[in-house]
Amino acid sequence: MIDKSKVEKAIELLLEGIGEDVTREGLAETPKRIAAMYEEIYGGYDMDPAEILKKRFKVTGSEIVLEKDITFYSTCEHHLLPFYGKIHIAYIPDGEVVGLSKLARLVEVYAKRPQIQEQMTAQIADALMDNLHPKGVMVLAEAEHMCMTMRGIKKPGSKTQTIATRGEFKDSENLRRQFFDMIKD
């Protein structure tokens, strides 16, 4: 999905726009390097959540499944600066579970797109509900945003938390409390 030639041209224009000489030794290959990097960091567009969550295993129980401290790196769509942190995902199976690595892969689908944290958190919860059909889902994302750290307000160490609840997690304060107890270190 990434058009590397367009990215290279855009980076050349950007460098010229900030007053750089795009032919100097240190920058001559930068547009190609950035285009290759963008294939990696914006690879979420080429990933399908339904495909990731397709392989399932039958279970008889319906207790909470939690994968916590999933590290992610994303890019703020407003400033094209990184935000990064951890995501915790819990769901209550309704007869099926997915492999734990699939939850981390699902995070990558949405983290590897320019976007906002609030939307990413909701997308992860919705993808689980739409594809796995659990009884409930809860997702908590905590991130530091470079647009708050290195520019603007300049408050390093400040973190943003976003939560998405679906199904039984949305309806039960007890389940939400259990989730928060489970993610404590």
Image (tube, grey):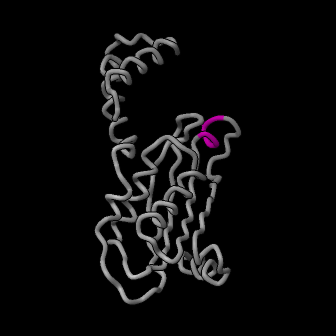
Quadrant of residue 58 in the image?
bottom left
Measuring 65% from the left and 52% from the top, which residue is drawn there? 158
Q: Position of residue 162 (x, y in %)?
A: 62, 59
- 44 vs 72, nearest the viewer: 44
The image quadrant where one finds the N terminus is top left
Q: In the image, residue 3 lies at what x, y percent?
A: 34, 27
Magenta run includes residue 11: no
Please name whichever residue, 82 or 127, is drawn nearer the observer in this view of the structure: 127
Residue 185 appears anywhere in the view: no
Secondary structure, magenta segment, majority class: helix
Q: Quadrant of residue 182?
A: bottom right
Position in image of residue 120 (x %, y %): 53, 53
Q: Which residue is drawn at 35% across and 52% down?
A: 48
Which one is in front, 132 or 160? 132
User: Residue at 38% across / 56% down in the picture?
Assistant: 49
Eyeballing the image, is 169 above or below 28?
A: below
The structure residue drawn at horizontal position 38% and vertical position 24%, both measured from the top left corner, is: 7
| Closer to the camera in the image, 44 or 61 | 61
Residue 123 in the image: above or below residue 59:
above
Q: Which residue lies furthest to the right in this view?
A: 153
- Give x and y (percent) for residue 125: 52, 63
Q: In this view, does 130 lie to the left or right of 7?
A: right
Q: Is residue 26 visible?
A: yes
Extent of the magenta region: 147-151
Number of on-image labels: 0
Report if residue 148 lies within the magenta region.
yes
